[in-house]
């Protein structure tokens, strides 16, 4: 039984994240989407709201081997607690590399038995991130194609759209 964690802030989860999750589900027996509080960011949605949005997608799409949880603390400790052998990260562009490289090496320093697995999303998602989605929402842009319908519905409760 191979378990992987897919950690991130997911504020909100995008179609790019889901592309990575689906690839990971094809490789591991179980994937735990791990929603971090991330003290360096001030999220738009609370941890519980982000978890609820992801749970709704897991149910809708019937991802049988995916679960979602919130976590605080050190990622590798959480991975060990859940007997995970891998951490999944998406690599979209070279600009992701430096930060990901540092994080992967530090996680390996702390827990040599846990591997970081990098997956590349479809090219159509290489320029996507959650901040851009939040900005488009705030400024009445068109961002429907970048996030699942349930997330779009939630975003429009905060930022009513005239489109
Ligand atoms: N599609 C679209 N966007 C993507 C993406 C994809 N496939 N993959 C990443 N992104 C975006 C995210 O939306 C996010 O955008 P934003 O900055 O505009 O919000 C950005 O890329 C990176 O976010 P994410 O992948 O969610 O990671 P993160 O940097 O927010 O999270 C943690 C990093 C939570 C995994 C890391 O801080 C952590 O492990 N924290 C726990 C504490 C710990 O163990 N620290 C030691 C680390 S060595």
Image: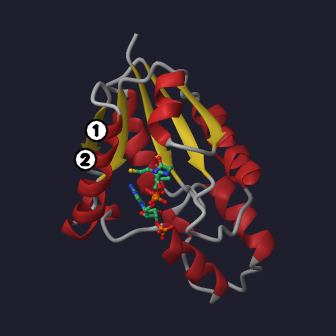
Colour mapping used in the image: secondary structure
What residue do we see at 56% from left, 82% from top?
A: 136
Side (left or right) of 98 relative to 48 = left
What residue do we see at 26% from left, 44% from top?
A: 118
Q: Secondary structure at mark 2?
A: helix
Q: Residues within 10 Å of mark 1 (few under 14, many from 20)?
A: some
What residue do we see at 47% from left, 24% from top?
A: 80
Q: Residues within 10 Å of mark 2 (few under 14, many from 20)?
A: some
- Mark on residue 13? none
For this orientation, the residue located farthest to the left is: 94
Distance between the alpha carbons at the discs numbered 1 and 2: 5 Å
Residue 116 point in image, percent of width and height: 29, 38
For this orientation, the residue located farthest to the right is: 157
Residue at label 2?
105
Quarter location, residue 55: top right
Residue at label 1?
108
Q: Quick check: 146 above or below 85?
A: below
Residue 85 point in image, percent of width and height: 36, 23
For this orientation, the residue located farthest to the bottom is: 139
Residue 74 point in image, percent of width and height: 51, 43
Quarter location, residue 69: top right
* Residues at circles 1 and 2 in contact by the CB criterion of under 8 Å: yes
Side (left or right) of 11 relative to 153 = left
Quarter location, residue 57: top right
> Is 139 or 30 nearer to us in this picture?
30
Mark 2 vs ligand 1: CB below 8 Å = no
* The N terminus: image quadrant: top left
Q: Secondary structure at mark 1?
A: helix
> Is 47 or 17 nearer to us in this picture?
47
Ligand 1 lies in quarter: bottom left
What residue do we see at 29% from left, 24% from top?
A: 113
Q: Quick check: 29 above or below 44?
A: above
């Amino acid at each position: 039984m191979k378990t992987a964690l897919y950690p991130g802030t997911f504020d909100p989860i995008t179609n790019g994240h889901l592309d990575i999750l689906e690839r990971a589900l094809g490789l591991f027996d179980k994937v735990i989407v791990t929603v971090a509080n991330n003290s360096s960011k001030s999220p738009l949605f609370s941890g519980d709201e982000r978890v609820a949005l992801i749970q709704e997608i897991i149910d809708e799409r019937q991802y049988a081997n995916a679960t979602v949880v919130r976590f605080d603390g050190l990622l590798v400790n959480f991975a060990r607690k859940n007997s995970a052998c891998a951490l999944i990260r998406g690599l979209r562009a070279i600009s992701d590399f430096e930060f990901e490289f540092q994080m992967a090496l530090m996680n390996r320093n702390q827990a040599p038995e846990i591997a970081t697995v990098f997956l590349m999303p479809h090219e159509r998602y290489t320029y996507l991130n959650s901040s851009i989605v939040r900005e488009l929402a705030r400024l009445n842009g068109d961002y429907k194609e970048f996030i699942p319908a349930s997330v779009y519905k939630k975003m429009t409760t905060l930022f009513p759209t005239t489109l």
